[in-house]
Amino acid sequence: MLELKDIRTSYGPIEALKGISLKIDQGEIVCLIGSNGAGKSTTLMTISGILRPTGGSISFMGKNITDAPPHRIVEMGISHVPEGRRIFPKLTVRENLEMGAYTIPRRLKTTPPNPPLSKGGAGGVIAQLDKVHGMFPVLKERWKQLGGTLSGGEQQMLAISRALMSEPKLLLLDEPSLGLAPLIVSKIFKAIRDINQSGVTVLLVEQNAHAALNLSNIGYVLENGTITLQGIGRELLNNEQIKKAYLGE
């Protein structure tokens, strides 16, 4: 589904990614773990077109997207939830969600809390809205509230929901549990599992290595811009190197 081959990405003279290669098959949850500054967020931003690689290639669903602009990548089916949530704080919950659906031609024209459902399938904004409200009911309650007034956990739910509004095939998640209370973290990870079970492939960057590896089919370890280890997620939990470096064991 997604394949990176020898990707190199730089910030000026500093090379952040030094030739990484990884592959994600359709339907998988793949996690990328590593210390701060290892290049995890850079990897996601390179995939989503925010950063342009200086070398290598990226293919998605058999098409080369190495030089594609971000809006085109979204249209092709990749959505990115950035680190720190990055919602629009001065827009309402409704407006944030509508922004996520800009690639879908038919715009939302009804006002919840009880919008009619699209019975026609996956093509409509209303259908997507119903899905995210089912996943995160609190957003339905906060429909007219400004994004910046939500709690941290609610903002993360909104950021994920905004990305889902474009009906992605692949969801990029950057540190979704960062700064959240344990109860909210468990809800976020359950939502990630539910999103994947609904048919969306997930690439997850996560500081909580134990939770990420336990959830993932495949895990990659990124150190100083290079991939140093990869394997089945749950098997990596028993790797001595992983235990010492990321699990505090």
Image: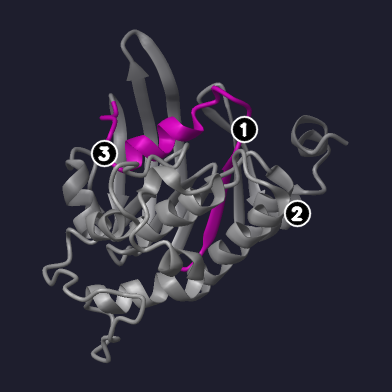
Who is closer to the viewer here, 153 or 51? 153
- Specify whether residue 242 is in view: yes
Identified by mark 1, the residue type is: Gly
Percent from the top left, x then y, of residue 57? Answer: 29, 39
Image quadrant where residue 194 sits: bottom right
Q: Which residue is mark 2?
A: 235
Mark 2 or mark 3, which is nearer to you? 3
Percent from the top left, x then y, of residue 94? Answer: 29, 61
**Residue at mark 2 to residue at mark 3: CA–CA distance:** 32 Å
Who is closer to the viewer here, 11 or 65? 11
Image quadrant where residue 98 sits: bottom left
Q: Which mark is residue 34?
A: 1
Q: Secondary structure at mark 2?
A: helix
Q: Which residue is mark 3?
A: 49
Of the residues under marks 1 and 2, which one precedes in the sequence?
1
Percent from the top left, x then y, of residue 136? Answer: 50, 67
Magenta residues span: 25-53
